[in-house]
Image: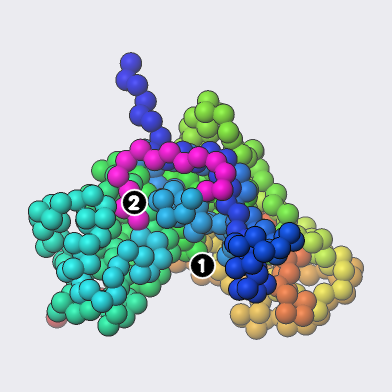
Amino acid sequence: MEKPSAPAIIVSGVSKKYKLYDRPTDRLRDALHLTGKQLYKEHLALDHVDLTVERGETVGIIGTNGSGKSTILKIITGVLTPTEGEVQVDGRISALLELGAGFNMEYNGIDNIYLNGMMIGFTEEEIKSRMDDILSFADIGEYVYQPVRTYSSGMFVRLAFAVAINIDPEILIVDEALSVGDVFFQAKCYHKFEEFKEQGKTILFVSHDLSSISKYCDRAVLLHRGRKLGEGTPKKMIDVYKQVLVGQEPVTGSGEENLLNDTMLRAKAKKAVRKDRKEEEAQPAGEELKYGNGAARITGLSLKDEQGRETKAIMKGSVCRITMEVEILKDIDKPIFAFTIKNALGIEITGTNTMVEKAFLSGVKKGDRKTVTFSQRIDLQGGDYLLSFGVTGFEGDDFTVYERRYDALAMTVVSDKNTVGYYDMNSEVTVD
């Protein structure tokens, strides 16, 4: 029986505390022990976080600003030292964290390639053998011979990423850097992600692009205020993250995404996540997630075809009606009624709402009942989709969720002609 390989990354009970001083002089006085008083406030950036990344996994870390995402990456890569806990890394890491980290701004691009490669542990000859691949990927032309301080942010990240992925890492760690490059560079980077996944390499990355998390990650980890709220399939964690974004107490599902510290439990969770992800890809009629502050309640949902028949199957190119019935439980000033369509992986394909469509901009009173119908031509490619619904609005400057129902209806689009991507362009083609 083949012995399972050890995890690539194990983070055990890691915490990181910072001392925050009101004045620079307080920092000096504290360092010199010139007073018996505590002159600082403690900020807990990470609070006993556990994380295991298996070899060959692609794991995304999501969370609001200040949740500790970048901090944990810096600790894993050795840039920061944890206040408590332990990190074990098995494999050569290549990391792309903050722009400028590891680069000498006065050196030109070529010098910085050698500098970074040697810092990782490569010889000059090994770096030289990879130089053509690095320069081809970066594609910044003659600027590679200019000082890095003259680069635009886009050129900078191109070079940094090219170095990071072309020195043959076993573990690639990326922190939001891809958002700087243009769409062509981003496509090239994600294509490289796919190559790395096929080669069995480990990828850990932080991103606010939830579509990328859904598409490329085997698993997602949600951090909030320094704590790990959960881990599981990207689809489930993104749904929980959206609750956090609007200040709702997270409502989780089956429990697979709860914190797991025991090795055996982690192994079981990993199998459950993979099984659940396969099921999502094959059949999206998953578990509905419902939350909100209770000012409104969605009491009925339906999907009807062109003949007005309630159905789950819609012919591609036809017009269907997507209806939500809503009971108003408190007075609301200008509620917004919305629906979105997601694919089986949880990627939001499209959607709209009454505010965007300028269809309903009035207030409602407690006891009102509203029937909201979206007449929608369906030009999606054939396949299975999930419909989510919401009643939201603004109270002052605050965005408020009155009720959301994620993955509430399943829709199958029946098609005899599937083209590329999510939508049929319905092109008219002439050949002379």
Quadrant in which the N terminus is drawn:
top left
> Can you give x and y, in whole percent of width and height, for residue 17 in the image?
60, 54
Which residue is nearer to you in this view: 289 or 302?
289
Taking 152 as reference, is 299 above or below it? Answer: above
Task: Identify residue type, mark 1.
Answer: Thr
The residue singled out by tag 1 in the image is 350
Query: Residue at 11% across / 58% down in the picture?
Result: 128
Query: Label 2: few (<14), some or many (≥20) within 10 Å?
Result: many
Judge left or right: residue 200 versus residue 217. Answer: left
Question: Which mark identifies residue 172?
Answer: 2
Q: Which residues are magenta?
A: 82-95
Q: Secondary structure at mark 2?
A: strand
Badge 1 or badge 2: first in the primary sequence: 2
Identify the coloring.
rainbow
Give the residue at the far top of this rendering: 1
Q: CA distance from mark 1 to mark 2?
A: 31 Å
Which of the 4 image quarters holds residue 367?
bottom right
